[in-house]
């Protein structure tokens, strides 16, 4: 309010100035305006006008028309400001309506979170969960909140693939083939099964003829090893389609051109290629088998895995030593694949 009062005081002082001083003041203001407009046009920027500036110009225009003298705004803009000023002056301030207080945005977001994390929950179930937290919200209000978020597309329509994998991770396995070619153009197929929960390679085999019978024999061995109902993810390769139900296995077939649905298996293939086979010239099956056995033993029992917080798939990290957290004495190393990698461990005391 003070800037507005100051502007009106300056305007009042103009009336008491001498004619020469008034002309000099007007010429100065005209020059300042010219410099200001030139600067903003050169920078291609809009002149910042505050709310109080708008009120001052609108009131001044009401007292004496200044439309033809304006250069920083359009005449229709000034007239619009003047209409808004008059409307706000003659409009009564709104009175608060009765009824329930509005639901805070924080509670609305909590309702949305509960729905997205528990897709089967209805309005009454969410209302009960909120009451546990000391929030009293009836089912009609919850329905209105969810209807609003549903229109915005913020509520998931069904169980996501990521959530399914997370909820079944301990009984979820994946299988696939990858190929290794020798220097003599012989192609070998490597079959493997990986555990989603531990990232352990629980089974692998090598063949030159990946037919259904070969896969069936691998499933027999897998069933004997696991001895419990599990899920098995595989792609649409013909040899991988089996009567899995007879082995107590529920199959999950990935979609066409959707490698991310079998991401753990794809990641293992990338790892074994980069960390093992890409560093060797392969001559025969015996060499492939030796590399497989040594690398998978390293992968399962020695190599920390980033996806499981740097734990070892088939083992555990040693407990932290609170007395000597940075102690480096007694550390030994063991070469893997001829020194391509090394396994580090503490010498037993």
Image (tube, helix red, strand yellow):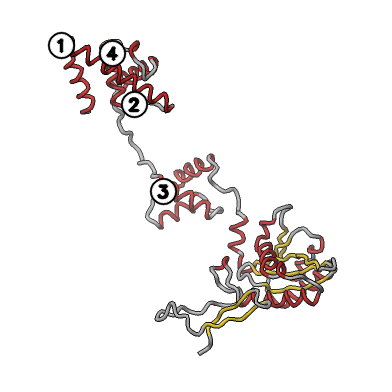
Number of dots carrying numbers: 4
Among the two numbered marks 2 and 1 on one chain, the one whose residue lies closer to the N terminus: 1
Judge left or right: residue 308 versus residue 258. left
Circle 2 Cα neighbour tier, 10 Å, few/some/many (<14 / 14–19 / ≥20): few
Q: Which quadrant of the structure image shows residue 19?
A: top left
Is the residue 150 above or below the residue 53 in the image? below
Which residue corresponds to mark 4? 62
Which residue corresponds to mark 2? 49
**How far separated are the C-alphas under marks 4 and 1?**
26 Å
Among the two numbered marks 3 and 1 on one chain, the one whose residue lies closer to the N terminus: 1
Which residue corresponds to mark 3? 107
Between disc 4 and disc 1, the foreground one is: 1
Circle 3 Cα neighbour tier, 10 Å, few/some/many (<14 / 14–19 / ≥20): some
Residue at position x 51%, y 41% in the image? 147
Is the residue 249 above or below the residue 289 in the image? above
**How far separated are the C-alphas under marks 3 and 1?**
65 Å
Instruction: Name the foreground residue: 80 vs 134.
Output: 80
Residue at position x 30%, y 30% in the image? 95
**How far separated are the C-alphas under marks 4 and 2?**
19 Å
Q: Quick one: SS at disc 1?
A: loop
- Residue 153, percent across and down? 55, 42
- Residue 313, percent across and down? 60, 73
**How far separated are the C-alphas under marks 2 and 1?**
31 Å
Between disc 3 and disc 1, the foreground one is: 1
- Residue 193, percent across and down? 71, 69
Q: Which quadrant of the structure image shows residue 20?
A: top left
Is the residue 293 above or below the residue 87 in the image? below
Judge left or right: residue 95 versus residue 337. left
Instruction: Name the foreground residue: 46 vs 27.
Output: 27
Which residue corresponds to mark 1? 18
Between disc 2 and disc 1, the foreground one is: 1
């Amino acid at each position: 309010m003070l800037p507005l009062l100051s502007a009106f005081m300056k305007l009042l002082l103009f009336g008491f100035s001498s004619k020469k001083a008034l002309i000099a003041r007007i010429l100065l203001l005209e020059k300042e305006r010219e410099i200001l407009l030139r600067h903003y046009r050169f920078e291609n920027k809009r002149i910042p006008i505050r709310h109080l500036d708008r009120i001052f110009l609108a009131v001044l225009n009401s007292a004496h028309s200044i439309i033809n003298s304006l250069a920083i705004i359009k005449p229709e803009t000034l007239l619009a400001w003047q209409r808004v000023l008059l409307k706000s002056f003659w409009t009564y301030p709104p009175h608060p309506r009765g009824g329930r207080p509005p639901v805070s945005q924080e509670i609305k977001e909590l309702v949305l979170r509960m729905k997205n994390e528990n897709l089967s929950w209805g309005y009454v179930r969410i209302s009960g969960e909120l009451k546990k937290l000391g929030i009293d919200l009836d089912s009609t209000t919850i329905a209105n909140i969810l209807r609003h978020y549903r229109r915005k597309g913020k509520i998931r329509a069904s169980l996501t693939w990521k959530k399914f994998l997370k909820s079944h991770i301990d009984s979820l396995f994946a299988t696939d083939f990858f190929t290794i070619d020798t220097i003599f153009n012989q192609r070998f197929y490597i079959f493997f099964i990986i555990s989603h929960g531990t990232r352990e390679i629980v089974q692998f085999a090598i063949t030159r003829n990946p037919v259904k019978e070969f896969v069936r024999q691998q499933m027999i061995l897998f069933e004997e090893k696991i001895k419990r109902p599990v899920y098995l993810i595989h792609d649409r390769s013909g040899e991988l389609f089996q009567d899995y139900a007879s082995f107590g296995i529920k199959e999950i077939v990935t979609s066409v051109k959707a490698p991310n649905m079998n991401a753990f298996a794809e990641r293992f293939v990338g790892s074994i290629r980069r960390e093992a086979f890409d560093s060797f010239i392969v001559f025969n099956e015996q060499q492939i088998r030796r590399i497989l056995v040594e690398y998978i033993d390293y992968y399962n029992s020695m190599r920390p895995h980033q996806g499981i917080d740097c734990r070892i798939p088939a083992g555990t990290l040693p407990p932290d030593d609170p007395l000597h957290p940075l102690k480096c004495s007694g550390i030994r190393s063991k070469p893997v694949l001829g020194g391509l990698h090394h396994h580090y461990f503490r010498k037993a005391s």
